[in-house]
Amino acid sequence: MTVAVATLGFPRIGLRRELKHALESYWSGKSTLADLQSAAAGLRALNWNRQKALGADILPSNDFSLYDHVLDTSALIGAVPPRYDWAGESVDPDLYFAMARGAQQPAACGHAHGGDTTAMEMTKWFDTNYHFLVPELVAGQSFRIASTKIFDEYEEAKALGYQTRPALLGPVSYLMLAKGKAVEPLALLPRLLEVYAEILSRLAALGADWVQIDEPCLVLDLTDAQRIAFERAYSALATRGPKLMLTTYFGGLGDNLDLVAELPVHGLHLDLVRAPDQLEPALAKLQPHVLLSLGVIDGRNIWRANLPDLYWRLKALAAQRDLILAPCCSLLHVPVDLALETSLDPEIAQWLAFAVQKVEELAALAKALNEGEDASFAAFSASRIAAVARQTSPKIHDPAVTQRLAALDAGATNRASPFAARREAQQARLNLPAYPTTTIGSFPQTPEVRKARAAHLKGEIDDAAYAQYLRVETRAAVKWQEEIGLDVLVHGEFERNDMVQYFGEQLAGFAFTRAGWVQSYGSRCVRPPILYGDVSRPEAMTVDWWRYAQDQTDKPMKGMLTGPVTILNWSFVRDDQPRAESCRQIALAIRDEVQDLEAAGAAIIQIDEAALREGLPLRRSEWQAYLDWAVESFRIAASGVRDDTQIHTHMCYSEFNDIIRAIGAMDADVISIETARSQMELLDAFASYAYPNEVGPGVYDIHSPRIPAEREMTDLLTLAAKHVPAAQIWVNPDCGLKTRKWDEVRPALIAMVAAAKSMRARALVKEAYLAK
Ligand code: GLN
Ligand code: ZN
């Protein structure tokens, strides 16, 4: 029996974000398409060489993408939305990038896809921070092979001497992720299967013996129609040429196991990191000839594995059947190589594994299973030593934090009084008008602001000069807000690099990489903080800047914090304790900050929970448990203040209907939310549930440079007032303004203040009329 090593996909961006640089240089017209293509080919070759050298036996192809693999699939099957005026030949790079990014200006080569065409919608890939372009399908949609990328890359690898296993998003997951216009996407399956069959035959003709066909939707709750679609799809495809490695990840098959066990595929990949317990039932149900690929190494998180442990878990099974060992999902979601982290605390670095190290781990594990434990003696002992060191490190364990959490009583998660009483106390203190105006926190991060930050980071300007620069910016922003008549001001967040990083850098328990970039979408990469230990807050994080800003004005200045759930969801988190526990620890640290802001005199404190919704588990049955601890964490952070201190929160999305009760349970005094893009769709949620506290439905979309007219905003507010009592409504933009230019922000906020004033005037007229 043999054990082989596969990767399901390797980071595309390159060790030093070479792909990002190549793409952005091409988009800005500084380099040619040929330059971009040769950079991309170079990265692919490097990735194949690297994975092979590290010990991978089965190499993926078509895991590379110039933007996104779901968009690649749309191109492959010719699913181009009608607004791109596609002639129906092949999808060329201009069209591809227009679908990805929109085409405001004429396309680079003056091609027909220029003009003013919007990009395809983007959304998160399952519960990761990777974003894909949502396929858009129309009634009468036809499919045909319109891109040769998957074939070209297979042949490109072959020319380099590598037999690869092409990775292809499966037809059912593709349709389940798609949005249909006047068509139920799954109804298009029969037509889509014809094209998939053709793709598979063509790959077989080129020499591919296996294809990795990704069906991550198999870990979701499925309807009967979706189950039937899987049966149809795989009975049609399993006999077409290459053997299919049906690849599932981001969770366990659960109640879909019976369905999967009946599909006539040759191989099955299981995620044993998220769902280790699914191995046994799978072994009981699967046909003996099905080749099992076991996702035993975490492809989503940066922790080093415990190889001896894994070895003992797999030893007996490896003696009985051939196995493939793999990361649980594509390595796309972790940084490339730990070797670049020369300034990371060496003790912490020892606990980590990035993509390169993960392939090495798999190779060592497979070698031991094939040749006996001693064959990987060195790797195993290093792995064991690191695991023990991590378990016992004083860097991780802070008894003071655990004791504080254990001692928290119910009082800590409740405000002293119910909302009605708080509201009275807050109004007495703040004396705000009806339809109070505010913004979400950040003002434009101009090129100058970013330049100053970079210069400070490089040591080109010293702390004092940088602080002075930030004070000037902050003061100007405060003065301007006062001038245009906003009611509740913000300091502008000029000092913050990122809403999570800024806090992580000041909290104990977080580490930061230098080059730990992970693709977020297209050329955009993020460097998530690494939450490795118990969290505490050594000293106040935001009080000085708040105080400086408040000193410039008599209007209330909001304290501005990122909430515990958002910090957690945008970090690499600990795998040695439940996420809920880590979240409560962060919540305590934020609670300390909230109390310090209050003591310094802040009457309003905003705790942003931008990422609360994205932490929702993939399976419905797990939602409530998540929402319970997420809401509890927010309440820990927010509840330590007096009645007359007003707590705000902010969320950047409007699909609220299914979690509206949990949002109510957060008991923030005021919540600001996104609504402008969905024309107050969100307010439907309030039709079935009377949101008890105050709410600021975003009155204009900050994601676009467009300047809203006063009238549009009064219309939206009038609509809002039909769903929520006027006395509960705040007036604010959709989200923070950091991505906008001042030339856009100025007229937009002036119009917004005018809209609020006109709503107030109307309310007065109405009152006078009613009094008659
Ligand atoms: N306070 C943050 C800002 O204004 C909130 C950003 C967000 O919700 N994404 O930028
Ligand atoms: Zn937002």
Image: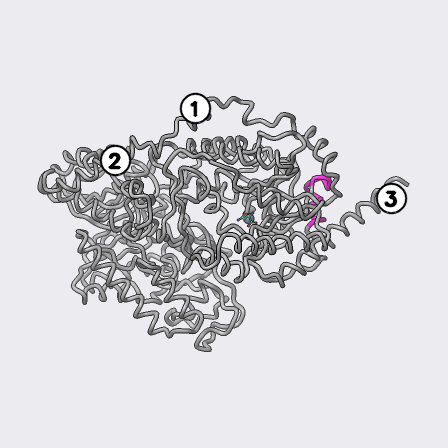
For marks 3 and 2, give the CA distance: 74 Å
The correct choice, above or below, for 197 with respect to 375 in the image is: below
Q: Nearer the viewer, residue 138 or 379?
A: 379
- x%, y% of residue 467? 54, 52
Three-letter amino acid code at disc 2? Answer: Ala
The earlier-in-sequence mark between 2 and 1 is: 2
The correct choice, above or below, for 769 with respect to 98 in the image is: above
- The kind of secondary structure element at disc 3 is helix
The part of the image, by quadrant, that contains residue 655 is top right
- The kind of secondary structure element at disc 1 is helix
Residue 290 shown left or right of residue 698 in the figure: left
Q: Is residue 453 magenta?
A: no
Residue 387, which numbered label?
2
Which mark is nearer the camera, 3 or 2? 2
Residue at 37% x, 70% y: name it: 90
The earlier-in-sequence mark between 3 and 2 is: 2
The part of the image, by quadrant, that contains residue 248 is top left
- Magenta stretch? 717-728
The part of the image, by quadrant, that contains residue 197 is bottom left
Three-letter amino acid code at disc 3? Answer: Tyr
Residue linked to disc 3: 769
Residue at 69% x, 54% y: name it: 752
- x%, y% of residue 599? 61, 33
- The kind of secondary structure element at disc 2 is helix
- x%, y% of residue 620? 44, 36
Q: Is residue 718 magenta?
A: yes
The C terminus: image quadrant: top right
